[in-house]
Structures are given as structure tokens and as C-alpha cells.
Amino acid sequence: MLYPLQDEPQQNYDSRGSQFLYGFLQSRGVIGEDEKGRMEFPTGMEGVSAALREMVVGINKLEHAECAEPDVPLIKCKRMALVRHFGGFDRARNEFNVLPFYRNVRRMLIADGVNVNMDY
């Protein structure tokens, strides 16, 4: 969940994957921000676990369909649509944006003097 703080999702698959996970969990109401902009889990870990199980089931269905479906490009398109839906994709600009939560946390960390850039 830290990658979007370090690298733009347009440039980094780990960042994009983290945003997908956050976006999916947020859509299920199991992750969000408190009034100070900190990550919170309003339903507790039970809600997070249930949402993660739901996500795994959905991904398994996609992977099974990809193996069984003669129209593999269609399945790949559905998989990409899923990532774009939850990962902050901007259709007008044709790129992934940083989700507001990550943008705000990054600003707070930088203001506190934290180096958020990846050192390779």
C-alpha cells in the first residue's frame, strides 16, 4: 500500500496495483480516511478480510475464464477494465492518476520532511 507514495502509478506497476487494492477496498467500505487524513478500517479486519476474499474469488473467475475462453483478448480487456475502474484511471488523459488519499498523505509526509522518493 506504500508504493503510490513513492512512484506515480503511470510509471510503476506496484504503485498501480496498490491503488487498485485501495480503490477496491474503499468501494467496499472497508478502508477510508479519518478526519486527519489517516487510513482507517471502519469495519475492522473482519470487513477487510471479507472484501479480500471477494476480490480473490473475482480474480480467480477472471483467470479461469481466461484459460477456458476462446476469446482471450476479451478476457484481458475485462481484466484491464477492472484495474482501470479501481486504480484511478483517467480516460480523458489516458493514464493513471494518483488517488486523492495517496496525494494527501504524500503532501503531509513531505511537509514533515519525510523523503518519499524511492532510492534505487
Image (cartoon, rainbow, N blue to C red):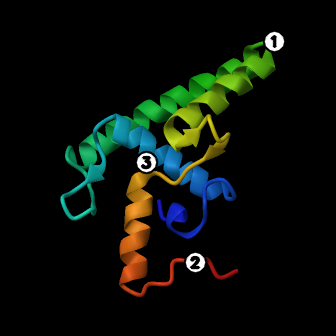
Please, what secondary structure does the residue beneath circle 1 have? loop
Query: In the image, 9: left or right of 44?
Result: right
Q: Which residue is mark 1?
A: 70
Residue 18 x/y as whole percent: 52, 53
Judging depth in this view, the residue of 41 and 88 nearest the camera is 88
Between circles 1 and 3, the one closer to the viewer is: 3
The residue positioned 58% from the left and 40% from the top of the image is 89
Q: Is residue 72 above or below residue 98?
A: above
Q: Amino acid at mark 2?
A: Asn
Please, what secondary structure does the residue beneath circle 2 have? loop
Q: Amino acid at mark 1?
A: Pro
Q: How would you rate the neighbour count of disc 2 (Cα within 10 Å): few for under 14, some for 14-19, many for 20 or more?
A: few
Q: How would you rate the neighbour count of disc 1 (Cα within 10 Å): few for under 14, some for 14-19, many for 20 or more?
A: few
Q: Earlier in the sequence, mark 1 or mark 2?
A: 1
Circles 3 and 2, Cβ within 8 Å, touching? The answer is no
The residue positioned 39% from the left and 77% from the top of the image is 109
Residue 2 x/y as whole percent: 48, 65
The residue positioned 60% from the left and 61% from the top of the image is 8
Q: Earlier in the sequence, mark 3 or mark 2?
A: 3
Q: Which residue is mark 3?
A: 22
Judging depth in this view, the residue of 96 and 22 nearest the camera is 96
Query: In the image, 10: left or right of 87?
Result: right
Query: In the image, 18: left or right of 67?
Result: left
Task: Give the spatial CA distance, label 3 vs label 2.
Answer: 20 Å
Task: Give the spatial CA distance, label 1 vs label 2.
Answer: 43 Å
Please, what secondary structure does the residue beneath circle 3 have? helix
Q: Earlier in the sequence, mark 1 or mark 3?
A: 3
Q: Which residue is mark 2?
A: 117
The residue positioned 66% from the left and 53% from the top of the image is 10
Name the quadrant containing residue 15: bottom right
Task: Give the spatial CA distance, label 1 vs label 3.
Answer: 32 Å
Between circles 3 and 2, the one closer to the viewer is: 2
